[in-house]
Amino acid sequence: MKTSPKDFFLHLGVIISLYISTVSLLTLVFNIINNAFPDNLNFYVDPYSAVIRWAIACLIIIFPLYIFLSRTTNRDYVLSPEKRNLGIRKWLTYFTLFLAGVTIIIDLIVLINTVLGGEIASRFIFKVVAVLVVVGLIFIYYIHDLKSVAVIQKSRRTLLASITGLMVLASIVSGFMIMGSPVTQRLMRFDAQKLADLQTIQWQLVNYFQQKGALPETLTDLRDPISGFVIPVDSQNGLSYEYKKISEMGFELCADFNVNSNSNNSSGMNYAKPIGVGSENENWSHAVGQTCFKRTIDAELYPPTPKRN
């Protein structure tokens, strides 16, 4: 039977949506496993769960599309059984089986390599299971799709579709539990912007100290129309950040935060310590509400610049 343009693009759409859904599901599951079994050697974790967001977004859109296109092709097979012998169908199905086998082999090689390099054993085990289950289901489905009669195929197809649907749903729910709601994500982004503003102000204060030999009394002293520096304000409420000079070389910066950065490391933020600026509270971890960061400038590391005559 000759392949029509409709048949070609319909089968191509099924395969492409299958590949995207598979990659997104495995990416999401791997990140869930990484979150469940954190590695202390990972010094930075994406605070906004960007990878998880992308995986969830793809699954929400692409996986239902795959189900729809698959059902459409299966309806065509019932109405026109001869379409099961279409060349495009067999080529893409066998290519998918080949790709599934190659994926299992490559993923197992990569996972074994990572565990030999010190990967946490529990992570390795669960990731191997995830690959075998997800790719194995695809392999089993398309093997039966090629060889089974229509009645048997339908019952097995329904079972595999139900199992896969539950896996996808459970993974999406777990992903939301890790990254939080869109509202939580927005609050975290506000907090990140506040920290970036405080770090900018901090280094302007250090620069001011080096140029003037003393800390400013207020933040307004930092304004410099020549360099174009404008003092940042809280992007969430438009208010100025709190600054207090507590000694000749010590100061305090305060802001009002929405999310606790240390609660089970949920935000994943690991803040770098500004070398030589402080000896107390030398990080940017914060609680909910107003948090103040005390800093003391090390004059040996940041000496005042000698004035030219």
Image (cartoon, rainbow, N blue to C red):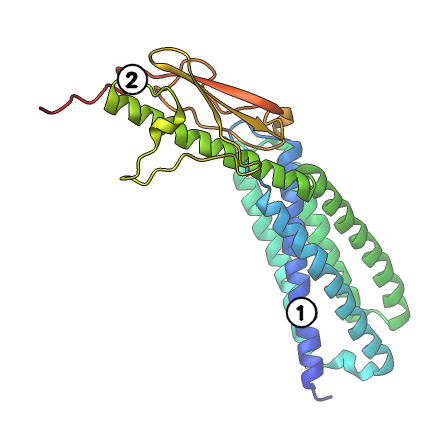
Residue hosting label 1 = 94
Nearest to the observer: residue 292 or residue 104: 292
Give the quarter of the image for residue 162: bottom right
Q: Residue at image x 91%, y 70%?
A: 151
Mark 2 vs mark 1: in front? 2
Where the N terminus falls, by quadrant?
bottom right
**What amino acid type should be assigned to the residue bearing mark 1?**
Tyr
Q: Residue furthest bottom?
A: 2
Label 2 environment density (alpha carbons within 10 Å; few <14, some 14–19, many ≥20): some
Who's the residue at 54% across and 45% down the image?
110
Split into 4 quadrants, where in the image is the C terminus? top left
Taking depth in this image into account, of 143 and 198 the one nearest to the observer is: 198
Q: Which mark is residue 214?
A: 2
Type of the residue with mark 2 = Ala
| 214 horizontally vs 11: left or right | left
Horizontally, is 226 left or right of 29 in the view? left
